[in-house]
Amino acid sequence: MRRSRPSGDPSPVGPDGGPAATRKRRHVPASVEAVVLLVLALLLALGIKTFLVQMFFVPSESMEPLFIKNDRIMVEKWSYWSSPVRRGDVVVFEDPGGWLGPPPPLNPVQKGLSTIGLYPTGGHLVKRVIGVGGDRVACCDPDGRLTVNGVPLVEDSYVKKGSKPSDRDFSVTVPKGRLWVMGDNRSNSEDSRYHRQLPGGGTVPESAVVGKVWAIVWPISRWDHIETPRTFDQKALAQE
C-alpha cells in the first residue's frame, strides 16, 4: 500500500517511505555553455582593461635606456583612482592632438584583441612626467640642469648617457590639470618641448593619461618593475 507523508507535506514518497524520483534536470548543450563562458571571459577581460591593467608596446627609442623599441609594457590604472599623477611617473597617454600621425592599421583579429587589452594599441605615447599643474619647469640652470620650481633634478639614473637635460632652453608654467612630459632619451624625444605651438603649449591634459607604467613584461629577458627616481622625492619640489 502506498504510504504518504504526514498532512502538510504534499511531496510524494516511494514505497520505502523515501522521496519519489524527481524529474531529470535538463543539461545545457555544450555549445551554448561554451558561448556563455566565452562571453563572460571577454566581459572580464574588458573590465580588467578598463579599470585595472592594459598592455602597450614602445614604438620608438625616446625612452631609452628605460625602454627599448618594441618592448611590451604593462600599465596599471589603480594608482590614479584616488590620487593625481605625480612627478617622475612614467605614463602612457592618448595623443592630445598633433603629436603622432595616424596609428598603424590592425587586422580584425588584432582589433578584437586590442579592444579587450590583449594586443598592444597605437595612438598613445609613453613619457616621464616632469612637471604637474602649477609647476615651473625650466632648462637649463647655470650648471646645465633641468629645474622644477627652482629645484635642480639629479637625472643621472634615468636620462640616457650622453644626452643633455635638454637641447633647447625653455621656461614654462604648467597649467592646472595638465602635465609637462619628457622622454629619457632627451636628444631623441619629441616631447612637450617640441609641441609648444599646439594648444596647451606642449602640455598634456591629465584626462588623457591612461595609467602608470608598472613593468616591462616582454621580452621575458627584459622583465623589470618600474620605480620613480628618488630625485622627485625632494620636499623642496612642493609648490609654495
Image (cartoon, rainbow, N blue to C red):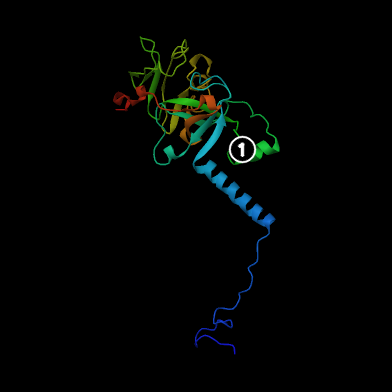
Residue in the picture at 48% in, 30% down: 215
Q: Which residue is mark 1?
A: 114
**Quadrant location of the N terminus?**
bottom right
Residue 210, horizontal then vertical, whole percent: 50, 35
Which x, y percent locates residue 182? 47, 22
Question: Split into 4 quadrants, where in the image is the C terminus?
Answer: top left
In the image, 226 versus 2, the foreground residue is 2
187 displayed left or right of 138: right
In the image, residue 108 lies at what x, y percent?
70, 38
Q: In the image, residue 142 lies at what x, y percent?
A: 35, 9
- Tell me what residue is drawn at x 48 percent, y 31 percent: 213
Q: Can the viewer see residue 209 in this picture?
A: no
- Amino acid type, callout 1: Ser
Q: Quadrant of residue 158?
A: top left
Please tell me how many numbered marks the rendered image carries: 1
Q: Quadrant of residue 16?
A: bottom right
The residue lying toward the viewer, choosing from 150 and 200, is 150
Which quadrant of the view contains residue 10?
A: bottom right
- Comparing 205 with 159, the one in front is 159
Residue 51 to residue 73: above or below: below
Q: Residues within 10 Å of mark 1 (few under 14, many from 20)?
A: many
Would residue 65 be found to the left or right of residue 26 on screen?
left
Q: Secondary structure at mark 1?
A: helix
> Which residue is outermost to the bottom?
1
Residue drawn at (38%, 23%) of the image: 136
- Whether residue 213 appears in this view of the structure is yes
As drawn, is 49 to the left or to the right of 84?
right
